Amino acid sequence: MPFATLTGIARPPKGKDLKYLQLWDHYGALLTENQREICEMYYVLDLSLSEIAEQKQVSRQSVSEVLKVSRELLDSYEEKLHHCAQDREYSLQVSLMMTETIDALERFKQFHPEFTREMDEIINTVAVGEKIDLDKEN
């Protein structure tokens, strides 16, 4: 019984939960109120099917069916709109640019040790994504 919980209720592996959590973040507003609530309880609050059924006063099968339909809708929205894929690609590009920037600053420090303090400040700022105040006096 792969991916079964201790209660015997089959749940998708965590990687799939993350996928649908991301899809829910992008397209959740397109679901019905009931679908949004159940998806939020399942993906965000990490409640079990039984816990959701108890709170919503419906059967576990009903909760499972709502999640199934919601996953199908979320998949179809992503297939048509590609927002999650574009977001992932953008995040990868930003990460690569930040890594390349930090590497370039580290190389600059090697050739210009007199700027080590300033370069370290910039590197630390870039690494945590804060705004750099280039006009401040030290």
Image (cartoon, rainbow, N blue to C red):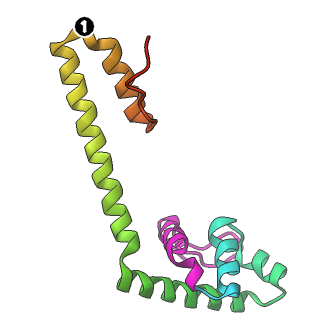
Residue depicted at x 41% and y 80%: 78
Residue depicted at x 71% and y 92%: 62
Tell me the amino acid under the disc marked 1.
Answer: Glu
Horizontally, residue 28 falls left or right of residue 118, namely right
Residue depicted at x 78% and y 75%: 51
In the rendered structure, which segment of residues is drawn in magenta?
1-30
Nearer to me, 107 or 6: 107
Residue 56 placed where, x, y %?
Answer: 81, 83
Residue 79 placed where, x, y %?
Answer: 36, 84
Q: Residue furthest top?
A: 114
Residue depicted at x 49% and y 83%: 74
The residue singled out by tag 1 in the image is 114
Residue 65 placed where, x, y %?
Answer: 63, 91
Instruction: Tell me: residue 114, above or below residue 15.
Output: above
Nearer to me, 56 or 14: 56
Nearer to me, 59 or 125: 125
- Decide whether residue 20 is among the magenta residues: yes
